[in-house]
Amino acid sequence: MARILSALGLVQISLASWVLQEPDVLPYHPQRSSWRLQGRVPEKHQVELQVALRIDDDRHAALEKIFWEVSDPKHLNYGKHLSIDEITKLLAIPDSRVDLVKSYFENAGASVEVAPNQDIMKVKMAAADVEKALNTSLHFFDHAESHGRHIVRAGSHYSLPAHIAKEVTMVGELLQMPSLSAASQNVQGSGDWPNSCDAKGCKGLVTPAVLAQRYKLPSSSEAVAKNSMAVAEYQGQYYNPSDLSAFGQSCHRNVTVDKTIGGDKPIPGVEAELDIEYIKAVAPEIPLTVVYGQQFSLLDWVNKIVSLPDSPLVHSVSYGNDEKQQSSVQYMFTCNTAFMKAGARGLSILFASGDQGVCGRQGCGLIKHAPFHPDFPGDSPYITTVGGTNFKGTGIGEETAWSSSGGGFSNYFGVPDYQKDAVAAYKASPDADLPPQELWNNTGRGYPDVAALGGSKTPYCVSVQGTFAGVAGTSASCPVVAGVFAKLNGLRLKARKSPMGFLNPFIYQNPSAFQDVTSGTNSATRRYGFTAVKGWDPVTGFGTPDFEALSKAAMKAVAGDEALLVV
């Protein structure tokens, strides 16, 4: 009896020493997730995790202060971006904190790689060791859109010993499930413009020439030293060089990938080839990097790009989280910190707003209309979000909001200063016809910030798997806008000015540089949504690019700026 009581005492002490992590995230349940539980992970299976170390509050505040200053064209420090080493010194993570956490995981059987800024550790270890170190269980999950690939996630909450937990923000991504909603494929086009591509399959579809005409892109642009751009690819999405070559030859554009980070296989995926073909359709003169994330991890991707000494200046990402359950405070804080580091370095990050209207990937219920579901990271104040449009008619001209374009107001983040006036004007507009207040957060950050063609009425002509087909979605809109800003960087770099970095302060200070979209609602198949109006709105932002106007605004914004590119 005494031995049993003693054992129970040890169990109680052991349990008391563990601290639950990301407690506000609901553990996996099949009714809340589109992912399917497949079974336990074998003990020796190697698992890679991202451990985010705690950043002292004053150091985090200092990073955010600099982030806003270097991103604001009206601030004296605009464009004075930091180097990796300067960010490391600014964050000042104590060596004792790094050593403590590193030793804990190494003693648990892991190999540990500390990021240059010392705030992130990449941990690789056997599944059995992970389960012991984090007091959890690991499982395989698959998805209808995962192309036969699976991910490893925790089947329940995870914990850390108290003395380690106080030095760690989170361990990712154990609870977050990625969204694998695919762009709409084989969509028929209805455009009556001439087919500028040689492929007959491009007839009636959006092509590089359509974008050039609508967004007033120059017929040619000069390659500028140090200019660069990138696309991020997940969910087993690769590109096939033969597809890219076929697109380039048919549509008369130089479509090549200059660098691939993370490995690649010649197995074509429509998302990857859409991204590559159309960011290069807009900016064929700019070197392109494909950053592949085989871990299905947003944290892995963003910490990878902020750790690269020569990170591309503009990043286009068609990615979001699947369900509300995954967005913990700690997860969003860690992502947003990395976004701020990127902006402080002069990197621009653009995300697609999603293709499910105001209801997001989780939906708004079947009988009673549930509240809207804003998307993360689309609603983050620290990145630029791109919505989708259609042509209003059958020709190249005025645009209207795509009904399935993601947009709305964040439930987590307040209205940032750069958009307070724009958001207030939208809510005061008699044309807004706001949906019932109980469905959305009146005090949240509004998104998207801008938009581009991407709706199902105006699908893009994409070369994929040896054929040309119509593809729609904000996954098309995002690389187009990213390519536009990459071209603007070229103008600035040629004038020996710094890159644009975080774009939103510039965007909100120059609304006339965009082609306003004043019609359409993003209700998708539901009754309620937000309506596009004159000026900014949570459907199309300020509208679609006008490269001629943007070029003038970009150069005017740096007229007195002597900051140079920092690498």
Image (cartoon, grey):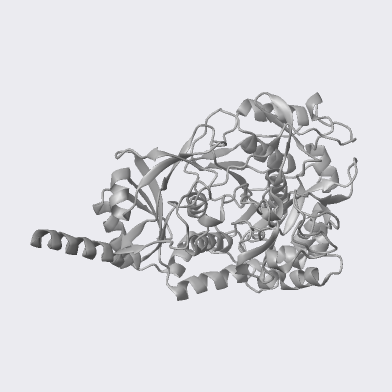
Foreground pick, 325 / 180: 325
Quick check: can you spot residue 187?
yes
Residue shown at the point (78%, 60%) measured from the top left: 542
Residue shown at the point (81%, 24%) measured from the top left: 200
Q: Quadrant of residue 281?
A: top right
Residue shown at the point (79%, 26%) measured from the top left: 201
Q: Position of residue 127 (x, y in %)?
A: 32, 44
Q: Is residue 513 above or below residue 63?
A: above
User: Which residue in the rendered view is the most extreme toward the bottom?
Assistant: 58
Q: Is residue 307 above or below residue 10?
A: above
Q: Position of residue 369 (x, y in %)?
A: 69, 57
Quick check: can you spot residue 493?
no
Report the quarter where the C terminus lies.
bottom right
Foreground pick, 503 / 523: 523
Q: Is residue 259 above or below residue 49?
A: above
How many numbered tags mark residues here? 0
Foreground pick, 344 / 404: 404
Q: Position of residue 560 (x, y in %)?
A: 71, 69
Q: Position of residue 248 (x, y in %)?
A: 72, 31
